[in-house]
């Protein structure tokens, strides 16, 4: 019962993390005094509600700093900090970097990011570290925009289904390399620039063939087997939950997806290895 109650409160906090959340608001939402609510939080999380909310706001700020062009002042304002100075002070205290240093760093440090608390058991994501050699691929480039906190399910499924159809048509594993950059005109939107191709040249697939060389180095590898509907949320779960949990630093480079061709695979399923460059 307490876990269900805590999950509901945390879900409400996540939906309202951009708002100013005070003790009286939590009491009205939960129906409990802040003291009783704090006892429940401490029992399962070792955090008070106030500390959890503050760290989740700073985590949201960290993603906004890395993935958008929003001014630091605007981020502080959106997350309802009293001032840019108080925001910068709290951010530096948690991460050991000023907001500007965190944004400009060549490495993305996930070490101090506060994960959204999950009172209920969640499926374990398997991973391993590996060294990839550079390889040449033949294919083409494409790009699309993506919201930071919302996935257009139908649009994303259609895009991946087209990719899977290409893979199955030519009976070969398929390579995708993607980089992310802030959208120039839209807040909280990213531009994803991708290269799609095969290890062997396939003139039947692409008339205007382009060559791409993948980057070598250390990566963390996540394996996925399941439905396409589940997979479209998989990379986000890795970034929002697992990288902070593992306290990793992401280095510069592209995310890599290797979609595996399986002749007997059912429609709507996908088998994929997902690689993220790490220090």
Image (spheres, grey):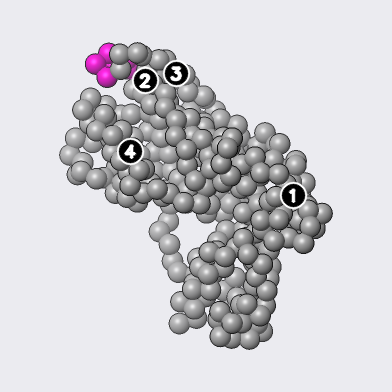
195, 48: nearer the viewer: 195
Q: Nearer the viewer, residue 129 or 148?
A: 148
* CA distance for labels 3 and 4: 20 Å
Which residue is tagged 4? 160
Task: Please say if 125 is above or below 51.
Answer: above
Which of the labelled discs sits on residue 139, or is there none? 2
SS of the residue at dot 2?
Answer: strand
The first of marks 4 and 2 along the sequence is 2
Left or right of 189 in this view: 177: left
- Position of 194 with respect to 25 (left or right) is left
* Rendered position, 201 above or below 271: above
Residue receiving disc 1: 73
Query: How many residues crowd around disc 1 within 10 Å: few (fewer than 14), some, or many (20 or more)?
Result: some
At 63% across and 77% down in the image, what residue appears?
A: 25
Q: What residue sits 36% from the left and 49% below the top? A: 153
Using the numbered discs, state the Cα–Cα distance from disc 4 to disc 2 in whole angstroms.
16 Å
Farthest residue to the front: give it. 185
Disc 3 and disc 2 in contact, CB within 8 angstroms: yes
Question: Looking at the magenta stretch, what is its main secondary structure?
Answer: loop
Q: Quadrant of the C terminus?
A: top right
Q: Nearer the viewer, mark 3 or mark 4?
A: 4
Total tally of numbered discs in the picture? 4
Quadrant of the image occupied by residue 23: bottom right
Residue span colored magenta:
199-205
Q: Earlier in the sequence, mark 3 or mark 1?
A: 1
Q: Which residue is mark 3?
A: 212
């Amino acid at each position: 019962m307490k876990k269900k109650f805590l999950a509901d409160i945390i879900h409400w906090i996540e939906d309202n993390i951009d708002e100013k959340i005070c003790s009286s608001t939590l009491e009205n939402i939960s129906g409990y005094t802040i003291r009783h609510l704090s006892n429940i939080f401490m029992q399962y999380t070792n955090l008070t509600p106030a500390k959890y909310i503050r760290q989740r706001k700073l985590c949201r700020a960290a993603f906004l700093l890395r993935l958008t062009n929003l001014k630091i002042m605007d981020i502080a304002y959106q997350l309802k900090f009293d001032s840019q100075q108080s925001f910068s002070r709290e951010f530096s205290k948690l991460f050991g970097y000023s907001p500007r240093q965190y944004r400009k760093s060549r490495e993305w440090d996930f070490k101090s990011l506060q994960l959204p608390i999950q009172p209920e058991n969640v499926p374990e994501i398997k991973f391993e570290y590996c060294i990839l050699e550079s390889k040449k691929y033949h294919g083409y480039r494409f790009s699309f925009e993506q919201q930071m906190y919302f996935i257009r399910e139908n649009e994303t499924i259609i895009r991946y289904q087209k990719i899977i159809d290409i893979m199955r048509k030519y009976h070969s594993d398929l390579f995708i390399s993607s980089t992310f950059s802030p959208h120039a005109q839209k807040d909280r939107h990213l531009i994803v620039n991708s290269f799609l191709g095969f290890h062997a040249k396939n003139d039947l697939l692409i008339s205007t063939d382009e060559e791409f060389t993948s980057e070598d180095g250390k990566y963390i590898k996540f394996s996925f087997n399941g439905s396409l509907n589940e997979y479209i949320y998989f990379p986000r779960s890795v970034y929002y939950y697992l990288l902070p949990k593992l306290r990793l630093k992401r280095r510069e480079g592209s995310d890599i997806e290797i979609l595996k061709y399986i002749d007997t695979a059912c429609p709507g399923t996908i088998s994929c290895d997902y690689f993220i460059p790490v220090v």
